[in-house]
Image (cartoon, helix red, strand yellow):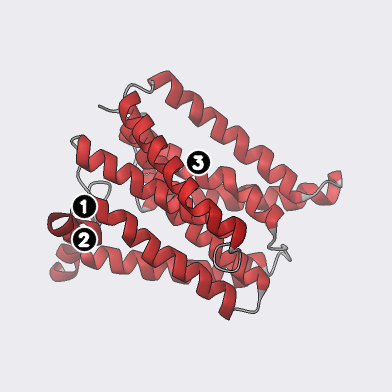
Amino acid sequence: MDFISDFINRYFLIPMGHYYTLPGTIAYAIFFVIAVLLVYKYILKKLKIKIDANFMLSLLPFIILGGVMRSLEDAEFYQSYFFVSPVIYITLFFIALSSLLFSVLAEKYIKRPYWQFMITIGSAILLYNIIQVLLIGIVNLTGFFMVAGLILMWAIIFLPVTLYFTKYLNRLNYFILLSHLLDASSTFVATTFFSYHEQHVVPSLLFPIFGSWIMFPLKIAVVWPILYLIDNNIKDKEFVIWLKIAILILGLALGVRDLLSLSMLT
């Protein structure tokens, strides 16, 4: 029992909110994949939720909310393990699930689509947290505009592919890829030009060898092919969208967190 307790403390509890360990990263990845499958089969399907563009739109405020709340924890506005990674994903799951259940119930009585209630609830909570960010202040404008410039550059680079070679990068995949490049851009700027250190295992291993710029080809080489393979190998269109939402969460939430943390803290 002492070995198990020491293992959990060393690789999970002590690093929480500060850095990731290899056993922790593997465990979190497995947990995330299982959660994605179980939520789809036992919650969304049971509730007969149609996984479409409206559903994705209704979740977008909650995905952004995760990044904003995590950055507020960095700024010490929130001071709880509920708002550090990876626990914040569980926190956001229950916030989003509660909102979904309420919205589905409201749809029956008010006769409005559930996703409209979801967007309203998510946007209201998100607005409150954005106000807290603004009250703390965006003090690192240099870092903010460096990231903004990089993501604009990537948007311009990949736009022709989306416009003229849709088969290889459709509009949704374009947005998801850019969300991951936002994460890469924020990480690159924060670790290269400011006193930040990478917390994740794989980048921490690669940065000393190649430099933090490796985040860009790494994201492109992993995310883009995965999106392409999902589109061309999975026939269930609703499951395709659900998988893309999961990938979007991993990019957009982290990208927003990194950008805001960099911008609020010098």
Residue 193 rendering spot, x and y as whole percentages? 21, 36
Residue 76 in view in this figure: no
| Residue type at numbered disc 3 | Leu
**Residue sitting at 27 percent across and 47 percent down?**
17
User: Mark 2 or 3 closer to N-term?
Assistant: 2
Residue 118 rendering spot, x and y as whole percentages? 67, 45
Q: Which mark is residue 65?
A: 3
The secondary element bearing badge 1 is classed as loop
Pointer 3 with pointer 1, Cβ within 8 A: no
| Residue type at numbered disc 2 | Thr
| Residue type at numbered disc 1 | Pro
Left/right of residue 157 with respect to residue 62 in the rendered view: left
Residue 74 rendering spot, x and y as whole percentages? 31, 35
Q: Tell me the quarter of the picture where residue 218 sits.
A: bottom left
User: Mark 2 or 1 closer to N-term?
Assistant: 1
In the foreground, 101 or 143: 143
The secondary element bearing badge 3 is classed as helix
Image quadrant occupied by the C terminus: top left
The secondary element bearing badge 2 is classed as loop
Left/right of residue 211 with respect to residue 259 in the rendered view: left
Left/right of residue 222 with respect to residue 110 in the rendered view: left
Label 2 crowding class (10 Å Cα cut-off): few <14, some 14-19, many 20+?
A: some
Alpha-carbon distance for marks 2 and 3?
A: 25 Å
Total numbered badges shown on the rendered structure: 3
Question: To which residue does mark 1 refer?
Answer: 15
**Residue sitting at 37 percent across and 37 percent down?**
147
Question: To which residue does mark 2 refer?
Answer: 21
Q: Nearer the viewer, mark 3 or mark 1?
A: 3
Q: Tell me the quarter of the picture where residue 171 sits.
A: bottom right
Label 1 crowding class (10 Å Cα cut-off): few <14, some 14-19, many 20+?
A: some
Residue 116 rendering spot, x and y as whole percentages? 74, 44
Q: Please say if 6 is above or below 107.
A: below
